[in-house]
Image (cartoon, rainbow, N blue to C red):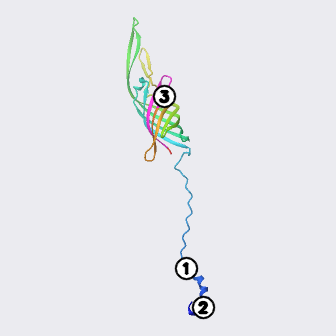
Amino acid sequence: MSSAFRRSPLALLIALAFLPCSAWTAYAAVPEEPPAPASATAAPDTSHFLPRWLHSSGSAGYGWIQGPALIRQRYEAGQDFELGLEARPRPRLRVRLNGEYQVLPAVAQATYAFLVFAGPRGQPVMDTLSFEWRQRGWLGAARAELQWRALPHTWLVAGAGRGYLGSGVRAFHFRNPFETLDVPFPGSSGWAWIGSAGARYDFDLFGPMLGAELRWSTLDRPQDRLQMWSLRIGWRGK
């Protein structure tokens, strides 16, 4: 302690009185940190316009008529498109409702022989009509399906529904002074019940989940039973 403080207790008391003021001045000189910003309220997730339990799907590819041969030879393979919604009640089960549109180019030539009249001795007199066309047929269908995962990434598909086949080939109406002839070609337009079965393999391509699907379908109509195949690549929502 200095000699001045030893000689004068009053000076010591004055120095002690100024110490709190000096400490408060030093504390006030330190800038206060700004308060942490209040956390913003989380914005609602608008990336999903469907309910969480419902998922979208779609696919595109080619389809063709397998039989009967009389109708198969009149159509070429055409583009096949599908859109659907699916629910996933179990990890290995999907329930799907989808709509399908398939283009069926109608390109063919046909010859139709018919009886004109019987001759004086009863012998038949025949005539022929030749038809050649290139038209646009189509198939529109809606169906419900079940998909079951039998192996990793591999799903078995089965479904049923209703569809309409636009053949692109109209019935031919022939008329002459002696008679009238209507030729309803096989494969005419009309409604049909549809059953289908197939398999699908899912794979991940740099993020999106895709799938390759092979499907067999049958169209039960009053005049015939069409069998069709389709091969498509599609995606499914998360």
Look at the picture and state if 21 lies above or below 96. Answer: below
What's the amino acid at mark 1? Ala
Asked if residue 162 lies in the magenta stretch, the reply is no
Alpha carbon distance from label 3 to label 2: 112 Å
What's the amino acid at mark 2? Ala
Q: In what element is the residue under mark 3?
A: strand
Dominant SS in magenta: strand
- Which residue is labeled 2 in the image? 11
Q: Where is residue 184 in the image (x, y as percent from the top left)?
A: 45, 21
The mark found on residue 26 in the picture is: 1
Q: Nearer the viewer, mark 3 or mark 2?
A: 2
Q: Earlier in the sequence, mark 1 or mark 2?
A: 2
Q: Position of residue 161 (x, y in %)?
A: 53, 31
- Which residue is labeled 3 in the image? 218
Please give the range of residues in magenta: 216-236
What's the amino acid at mark 3? Thr
Toward the viewer: 167 or 32? 32
Alpha carbon distance from label 1 to label 2: 23 Å
